[in-house]
Image (cartoon, coloured by chain):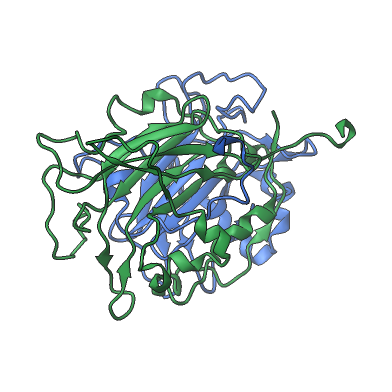
Amino acid sequence: MQESVKPNGITPSQTVGPFFKYGLTPNGEYAWNDAFTNSTLTPDVTGDRIRIEGRVFDGDGVAVPDCMLEIWQADAQGRFADPQDKRALPNASFRGFARCGTDKDGNYAFETIKPGAVPDPDGKPQAPHILLAVFGRGMLRHLYTRIYFSDEAGNAADPVLALVPGDRRATLTAVREAGKPVYRLDLRLQGDDETVFFEM
Amino acid sequence: MTFIYPVDSNKAHPLPLSPDYKSSIKRAPNKPLIPMRHTLSELTGPVYGHETVREGDNDLTTQHAGEPIGERIIVHGHVRDEDGRGVPNSLIEIWQANSCGRYVHVRDQHPAPLDPNFTGAGRTVSDASGYYRFVTIKPGAYPWGNHHNAWRPAHIHLSVFGYSFVTRLVTQMYFPNDPLFPFDPIFNSVPDEKARARMVSSFDLENTKPEWALCYRFDIVLRGKNATPMENH
């Protein structure tokens, strides 16, 4: 049986290309419905509701109008909506995943909640963070990064941020706007201030 | 079962910078990726059940009033992990050009006709054994501006989730024996020949439906191995 043959490796990645919008982020502009939106919010979700927004730039500082971004995060109690996280899930319908395409000026935005702290493999708390995957034309595989928050004291002791040279940590830190539940983080795919991407 | 995701498996993927693919030149990071241990954040991932997918979403030929023009095909296979086990309940999204090589996307300028009966988007969820199936139209090759006389081999874009955020995969499924393979910088961005072959579907006569549609098999292998503790060996 073909089914029992052990694969000789994984399926390689290929670029999402320039024309994914009608399939992955149609947003009412094509004859297809969205499986996902840019919001993780559900009526029963608890925690601080926030907006994360910014722009995506290429190595020339030009806005990238055809990126797709995906986020994955814990709820406000630091628990994931995945049976592999064995702890109880207080937010029954919270999924923790959202998807967004950039607009013509490279803008993106997510509506979500501030995640709680998640333990690292040694049981040490990580500072609140969101995983971010970046897809785009010209990107043969998506890139992984993390979003941290400027108003979290736990950043100083975060074991993943500690892997990042001090002068690059700002590329992972969304900055809170004064008086508003809005955080801002621009992504730079290449160049001086290039966003930190992780091998994972 | 607990899965591990060896970073070495990523060697099958293209490097971020592949200069023959012009768009990668200004969009690939210059600095090396920073290695990190997988934490619970990386080891978990979005779980989407059948409610994400509507009846008929896996048939791209029945979304409009009439039938699309072109060669009707069945595309099916299994989503598997690196040990060969089926990956159940995994969302698979596809999008593609029509039979003339034209995308419905507003920015596609290729002067080939649009088909009012074909959008080119579909989705399904793998079953308990990891099996999935689509019915669609064979996409056409199309020109693109990467270099002189550049043509993309016919392909279907696929997006797959798997067990965790690190198994996330976006790829392209190609058709066997395409004469454009040697000239395509995206296909050839995958450095290993055997890995490139894993992006090519195989013709499946056994599951070809007489008087109706040719069938192609495409198995998708995601990251993930059984993390059997050493003391059990």
Q: Which chain is blue?
A: A
Q: Nearer the viewer, residue B81 or A153?
A: B81
Residue A171 in picture, x, y percent from top left: 56, 60
Q: Quick check: A57 left or right of B154? A: right
Q: Is residue A146 left or right of residue B208?
A: right
Q: Name which residue lies at 27% across and 49% down.
A: B138
Residue A195 visible in this rendered orientation of the protein:
no
Q: Is residue A192 visible?
A: yes
Question: Residue at image x 18%, y 65%?
Answer: B110
Q: Colour of chain B?
A: green
Indicate the position of residue B26 as horizontal and vertical percent values.
44, 73
User: Of A4 and A156, which appears nearest the observer?
Assistant: A4
Write the residue at 49% across / 72% down: B18
Q: Relative to B99, is A47 above or below? A: above
Total numbered labels? 0
Frontmost residue, B230 versus B233: B233
Q: Quadrant of the C terminus of chain B?
A: top right
Q: Is residue A87 left or right of residue B122?
A: right
Q: Is residue B195 left or right of residue B136?
A: right
Q: Quadrant of the N terminus of chain B?
A: top right
Q: Position of residue B32 (x, y in %)?
A: 63, 67
Hey, which quadrant is residue A104 in on the image? bottom left
Depth order, front residue of A17/B78: B78
